[in-house]
Amino acid sequence: MSTQQKRKFFKDIKHYFWDDPYLFRTCADQIIRRCVFGQEALEILKACHEGSTGGHHSTNITARKVFDADFFWPTIYKDAYELIKSCDTCQRQAKFYIAMNCLKLTIQFVNFRVWGTIFMGPFSSSRGNKYILVAVDYLSKWVEAKALPTNDARVVVKFLKSLFSRFGAPRAIISDRGTHFCNDKFARVMSKYGVTHRLSTPYHPQTSGQVEVTNRGLKRILERTVGENRASWSPILSDALWAFRTAYKTPIGCTPYKLVYGKACHLPVKLEHKAYWALKHANFDLKTAGDHRKLQLNELSELRDQAYENSLIYKEKTKKLHDSKIKNRIFNVGDQVLLFNSRLKIFSGKLKSRWSEPFTITEVYPYGTAKLPHADGSNFKVNFHRLKHYYGGDTPPLVIPDLQTFPKDN
């Protein structure tokens, strides 16, 4: 080894220690992780990506699961990228999502005070179940889901009562305008527990944006874990929820499981491959384990406050990045505008423009909303991202110069 290599070797060796028969490393976050290599590292990576608690997540989330399982090797991110790139299921189920060109509104909620609900389905019948009722907490990203045979008000009320008994009555519940949420039975339960019911619209589904993201995440996990038999999704739902709850969430800076229970979730891969926790902490005496758990519960309040601040900072950064790519459009009362007809994406016409006839703005509201007059005399509201200025159809003719007046060289 050269002199430079020796210096680097003795500098790196300070972070490692040998506890026969395993090698451990004290990582940058001061957590001791067991060093693995070769086939064992590949098996751990596969378990964290496509195992029962994997969920076929992306490179960063899969690598984070390896770190949370207390294992280490120098090329975790590179190996995770190569594994996911060659994963047959991930390649077949990959999708692209396009964000709407409108300003973001950042909204912060207290833990377990605002829940979003939505129905998924209908799916292929699995043990008599065709629907999934999903509820997600807006701060901790904690997800509750249940497979149901129908999507009526009775099952919704029963599910919400079990949710209230576990986490307490929230301040508000956000849902769409489905008949299973908008009915007298649901309204009576909301009135009984003092819960405010907020509604989103098909025109602006971003009102329940967190629910839509969770819905998409659960659907993606189920797509990649059910295999060829698409009717076997019902028994796999619990594993999909476990994979979703133990996945690292960037907005809160930790996993939903840790934010709810105050400790990391010990996955089966830790016991199978003998992580440091399984070797040293599994045989704690009851008094030591109880004292350690009390310390974790005392730290839980501080952890939730930190997650709240991390979520706020993350949302502000994403809002700034998102809004910086949007062209600033200023509309005033009396401006002539064209309206983008988004329904043509579903029922498209051949050689037909998506921009409707010019309208005159009658009123402008904050947060990028304008009021336009309808043909029947009524008014309706639209967002600025569906409008563009109309400068009239009477354009002056182009003045074409006489070519005889130009020199021949030109």
Image: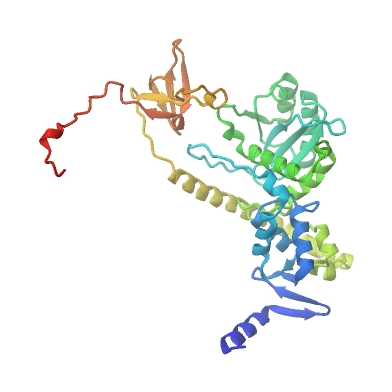
Q: 52 or 111: nearer the eye?
A: 52
Residue 263 visible? no
Residue at x-position 72% and y-position 50%: 88
Residue 377 visible? yes
Total numbered circles = 0
Residue 400, percent from left and from top:
19, 30
Q: 154 or 39: nearer the eye?
A: 39
Q: As drawn, which residue projects farthest toward the top? A: 376
Vertical order, 6 against 350 (above or below): below
Vertical order, 150 against 314 (above or below): above
Residue 81, percent from left and from top:
65, 59
Left or right, 20 with respect to 58, comes to right
* Quadrant of res 179: top right
Residue 89, percent from left and from top:
73, 48
Residue at x-position 34% and y-position 26%: 390
Residue 100, percent from left and from top:
52, 36
Q: How is the image coloured?
A: rainbow
* Quadrant of res 25: bottom right
Quadrant assignment for the C terminus: top left
Q: 318 or 85: nearer the eye?
A: 85
* Quadrant of res 202: top right
Quadrant assignment for the N terminus: bottom right
Q: 225 or 325: nearer the eye?
A: 225
